[in-house]
C-alpha cells in the first residue's frame, strides 16, 4: 500500500465513521478499487489503526462528556451521570454478543462482498430518509431506548449498514432529541472500539512490522484529522435535519456498487 492510498483510506474512514454512509462499506469499496494486496492480518491491522484514530477523535470532541461518564460510573449514586454511564454499557451488550458468538460469520462479509455492501447502503438510505422525516423532540435516551439503539449498532457490523446512521436513525425514530441522539451514538461506540483493539492484540491477530510503520502512521493521522472534522459536522447536520442528503448519497452509491458487481460477473 502506498502513502497516497493510506491517506485516502484514512480520510474515508475518518469521514465515514461519523457521517451516516458506512465506514466499513466505503473501506471495502475503496480496497476493491485499489486492489487490496495486503495479507489478511496486515489488512486487519490497518483497519484497526484507522478505527483507533477515529475513536481518539471522538474522545477529543467529547472529552467533557467522557470525563462525566467516567466520574458518574464510579460515584455509585443514582444521578444523571451514573444513569447515562449505565445506558452506554447497556447499549454495548448486543454488539458484544454479536462479536463474541458470530465473529466468524461477520468476518466472512469483509472479503470484497461489494454486492452485499450495495444492498446494505440502500437499507441505510431508507433508515436515514425515515429519520429525517421524524418530528423533533426534547426526549432523553431511556434504558429501553439504549437496548434498541444497541441492537441497531450490532446490526451495523454488516458492511454497508452505517453505524452512526443506524443508531442515530433508530434514536430519532424512537423520539429522542436529535442532538442527544448523535451524542449518544458517538459515545457508545468508543468502548467497543477499544475493546475490539484489545481483543485483537491479545489474540495475536494484529501484527506490526517496521515496513508498515510509515503507512500506518500516515493513515492514522489522516483518519484522526478527518474524524475531528466529520464529528463536528455531523452534530450540526443532525440538528438541522439534513439526513436526506446522505440518504440520497447512500442510495446512489449502493446502486452503483450493485451495478458494477453484476456487470463484472
Image (spheres, rainbow, N blue to C red):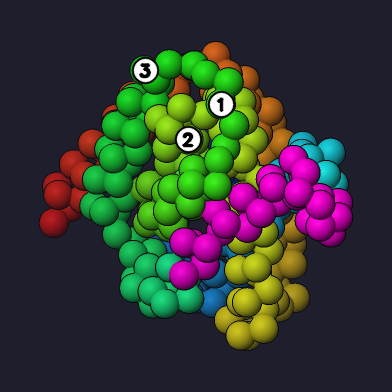
Q: Foreground: 25 or 72?
A: 72
Numbered badge on residue 133: 3
Q: For the stretch drawn in magenta, what is the main secondary structure?
A: helix
Q: Foreground: 244 or 81?
A: 81
Could you tell which of marks 1 and 2 lies nearer the N-terminus? 1
What is the residue that sits farthest to the front in this orientation?
78
Q: Foreground: 112 or 120?
A: 120
- Span highlighted in magenta in the image: 69-97
User: Dividing the picture into quarters, in which one does residue 187 lie?
Assistant: top right
Residue 109, image x, y percentages: 33, 65
Above or below 163: residue 231: above
**Between marks 1 and 2, how big is the CA–CA gap?**
10 Å
Badge 1 element: loop
Does the magenta portion include 119? no
The C terminus sits in image quarter: bottom left
Q: Which residue is mark 2?
A: 171
Residue shown at 43% from the left, 68% from the top: 98
- For residue 251, say whether it is visible: yes
Above or below 127: residue 101: below
Could you tell which of marks 2 and 3 lies nearer the N-terminus? 3
Amino acid at each position: 500500500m502506498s502513502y497516497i492510498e493510506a491517506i485516502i483510506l484514512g480520510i474515508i474512514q475518518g469521514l465515514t465513521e461519523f457521517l451516516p454512509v458506512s465506514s466499513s462499506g466505503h473501506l471495502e469499496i475503496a480496497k476493491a478499487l485499489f486492489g487490496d494486496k495486503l495479507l489478511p492480518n496486515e489488512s486487519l491491522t490497518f483497519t484497526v489503526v484507522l478505527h483507533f484514530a477515529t475513536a481518539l477523535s471522538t474522545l477529543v470532541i467529547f472529552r467533557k462528556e467522557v470525563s462525566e461518564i467516567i466520574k458518574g460510573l464510579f460515584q455509585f449514586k443514582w444521578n444523571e451521570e451514573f444513569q447515562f454511564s449505565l445506558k452506554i454499557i447497556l447499549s454495548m451488550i448486543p454488539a458484544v454478543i454479536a462479536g463474541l458468538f458470530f465473529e466468524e460469520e461477520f468476518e466472512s462479509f469483509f472479503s470484497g462482498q461489494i454486492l452485499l455492501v450495495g444492498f446494505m447502503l440502500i437499507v441505510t438510505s431508507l433508515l436515514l430518509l425515515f429519520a429525517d422525516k421524524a418530528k423533533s423532540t426534547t426526549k432523553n435516551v431511556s434504558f429501553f431506548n439504549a437496548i434498541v439503539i444497541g441492537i441497531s449498532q450490532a446490526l451495523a457490523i454488516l458492511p454497508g449498514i452505517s453505524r452512526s446512521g443506524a443508531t442515530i436513525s433508530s434514536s430519532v425514530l424512537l423520539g429522542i432529541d436529535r442532538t442527544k441522539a448523535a451524542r449518544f451514538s458517538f459515545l457508545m461506540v468508543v468502548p467497543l472500539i477499544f475493546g475490539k483493539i484489545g481483543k485483537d492484540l491479545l489474540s495475536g491477530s494484529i501484527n506490526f512490522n517496521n515496513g508498515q510503520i510509515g503507512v500506518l502512521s500516515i493513515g492514522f493521522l489522516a483518519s484522526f484529522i478527518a474524524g475531528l472534522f466529520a464529528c463536528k459536522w455531523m452534530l450540526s447536520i443532525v440538528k438541522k435535519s439534513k439526513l436526506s442528503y446522505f440518504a440520497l448519497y447512500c442510495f446512489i452509491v449502493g446502486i452503483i456498487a450493485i451495478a458494477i458487481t453484476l456487470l463484472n460477473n
